Amino acid sequence: MFFEHIPHLHYIWLVAASTIAGVMNAMAGGGSFLSFPAMLGMGVLPVQANATNTVALWPGQLTSLATLRGDIRKDLLPTVAVTSVLGGVLGGEVLLHTAQRTFMHMIPWLMLVGTVIFAISGPVSKWIRRRAKHEDVEPYIPRVPLACALFPVCFYIGYFGAGSGFMVMTIFALFGMERMHTLNALKVVATLLANLCAIITFIFQGAIVWHYCVVSMVFAGLGGWVGARFARRVNGDVLRAIVVVTGCVIAAYFFWRQTQG
């Protein structure tokens, strides 16, 4: 690979990509569109690269939960938790049993789907906000239908996950939930637990490349801190456009690589 001919350039690339991914996640989301290809650029096999990237970015979700814990609907927490755990474990297991070549062929499609989901999340989020009435009484949400609707998304989180946070929020909105703070808090719970269970599965199966994971985790955390400080100073639509363009370019690159193979 190109990186092998320049000493230490692969580590510089990993540090830069992880830092920018942390900034993106803090300011708009979509950091995986950059950090995951960076793992592949290190020569890590596709399945292990996805698993390692999931572990590296997970601590940022944990700090988000600490901030939003007061907005969680306690009555829905057991349903969301159980569904997230089951979906995350199954998604992680399926990923680890996917052939490297098969997953490599799926990467551009997964990146493209994640990019499209992220692109439409802005207009739909604005629609959800317009619907919000800030009522004191939350609507009743039937548990079994909610679990059935949420499970495929949690499976996707455990398997790949790009754009999944918006999908979780959309499901809750379709069930009548209108408070943005509550939607965001439950989204963090679902993605946090699904990713955690997938991570535990990855660790037990030995799928994590730890020396790259630790480097990425540290600098993604640094990028997240920087991004959080400057998030309010940058136009959200501009940030979203940058993420979408990045995702499209990377998806196009992987499609091109397949034609060369």
Image: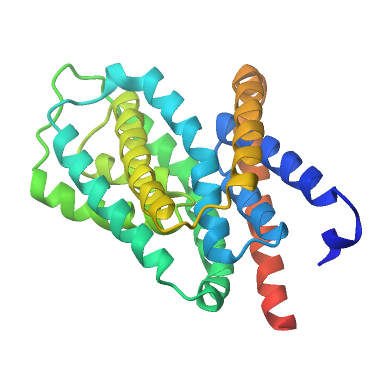
Q: Against 216, is 247 above or below?
A: below
x, y (%) of residue 55? 49, 44
Q: Where is residue 24 in the image (x, y as percent from the top left)?
A: 62, 36
Whether residue 15 is visible here, answered yes or no, is yes
**Rendering colour mode:** rainbow
Residue at the spot 58% in from the left edge and 52% down from the top edge: 209
Eyeballing the image, is 103 above or below 26?
below
Q: Nearer the viewer, residue 201 or 114?
A: 201
- Residue at x 61%, y 39% (from the top left corner): 214
Residue most toward the right? 6
Q: Where is residue 172 in the image (x, y as percent from the top left)?
A: 25, 41
| Residue 21 showing in the rendered view | no
Q: Is residue 63 toward the left or the right of residue 172 in the image?
A: right
Q: Which residue is drawn at 46% across and 45% down?
A: 121
- Pick the residue in front: 71 or 96: 96
Question: What residue is rendered at 38% in x and 20% in y?
Answer: 66
Comparing 132 with 113, the one in front is 113
Position above or below: 202 against 20: below
Image quadrant in which you'd find residue 23: top right
x, y percentage for residue 73? 20, 26
Please state, as top left, top right, bottom left or bottom right, where the C terminus lies in the image.
Answer: bottom right
Q: In which quarter of the image is the N terminus?
A: bottom right
Q: Which of 5 and 170 is in front in this view?
A: 5
